């Protein structure tokens, strides 16, 4: 049995992990075995640049953090090596980045995930991973809004040009 100090530290870790999980809009649990240091460094850099918090976590600590929550269904995935990627803003970033990496690796696997505090299956994670980034989506929407306005402006300009030709 651990002493009181160790037990208190672990309880703080579980509480901190629970806070991170509650604040996250999306999360992905991966089995990171077989990843090289160089690949891990590149992966962490890409995740960090996209606002994703990525860290290795002990299965027992994560299990205790999700106990008595809707995420408790993910307990079955908590075996072997486990890392957790959390995002507080971008729903697609963790899934997109980790799925891309998992497709290149034989041993790096996605084990579970959640959206808005509810567990999702691997098919959903893969579907989310195929979504474009937030910036691409915003550019697409702006392009769709701008197209009718641009067409209208060209039509008005054509009318002005035609009336100028007639006046000359």
Image (cartoon, rainbow, N blue to C red):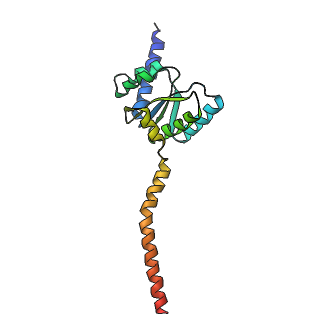
**In this orientation, which residue lies closer to the viewer: 21 or 148?**
148
Percent coordinates x, y for residue 98 in the rendering? 53, 35
Q: Considering only vertical position in the picture, is 30 above or below 7?
A: below
Q: Residue at x 44, y 16 (%)?
A: 8
Residue furthest right in the image: 38
Percent coordinates x, y for residue 59 in the rendering? 47, 20
Percent coordinates x, y for residue 62 in the rendering? 44, 23
**In this orientation, which residue lies closer to the viewer: 112 or 18?**
112
**In this orientation, which residue lies closer to the viewer: 1 or 103?**
103
Q: Residue at x 56, y 41 (%)?
A: 49
Q: Considering only vertical position in the picture, is 141 above or below 88?
A: below
Q: Considering only vertical position in the picture, is 38 above or below 163?
A: above
Tell whether 66 sits left or right of 44. left
Counting the numbered discs, the total is: 0
Q: Quadrant of the N terminus?
A: top left
Residue furthest bottom in the image: 168
Tell whether 136 sits left or right of 39. left
**In this orientation, which residue lies closer to the viewer: 72 or 15?**
72
Percent coordinates x, y for residue 9 in the rendering? 47, 18
Q: Residue at x 49, y 88 (%)?
A: 165
Tell whether 111 sits left or right of 66. right
Tell whether 104 sits left or right of 114. right
């Amino acid at each position: 049995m651990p002493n009181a100090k160790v037990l208190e530290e672990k309880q703080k870790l579980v509480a901190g992990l629970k806070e991170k999980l509650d604040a996250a809009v999306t999360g992905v649990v991966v089995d990171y075995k077989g990843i090289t240091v160089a690949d891990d460094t590149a992966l962490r850099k890409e995740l960090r640049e996209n606002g994703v918090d990525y860290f290795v976590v002990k299965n027992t600590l994560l299990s205790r953090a999700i106990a008595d929550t809707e995420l408790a269904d993910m307990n079955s995935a908590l075996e072997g090596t486990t890392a957790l990627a959390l995002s507080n803003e971008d729903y697609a970033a963790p899934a997109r980045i980790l799925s891309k990496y998992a497709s290149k690796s034989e041993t790096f696997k996605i084990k579970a995930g959640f959206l808005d505090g509810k567990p999702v299956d691997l098919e959903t994670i893969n579907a989310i991973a195929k979504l474009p980034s937030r910036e691409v989506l915003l550019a697409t929407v702006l392009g769709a809004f701008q197209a009718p306005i641009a067409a209208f402006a060209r039509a008005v300009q054509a009318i002005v040009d035609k009336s100028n030709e007639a006046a000359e």
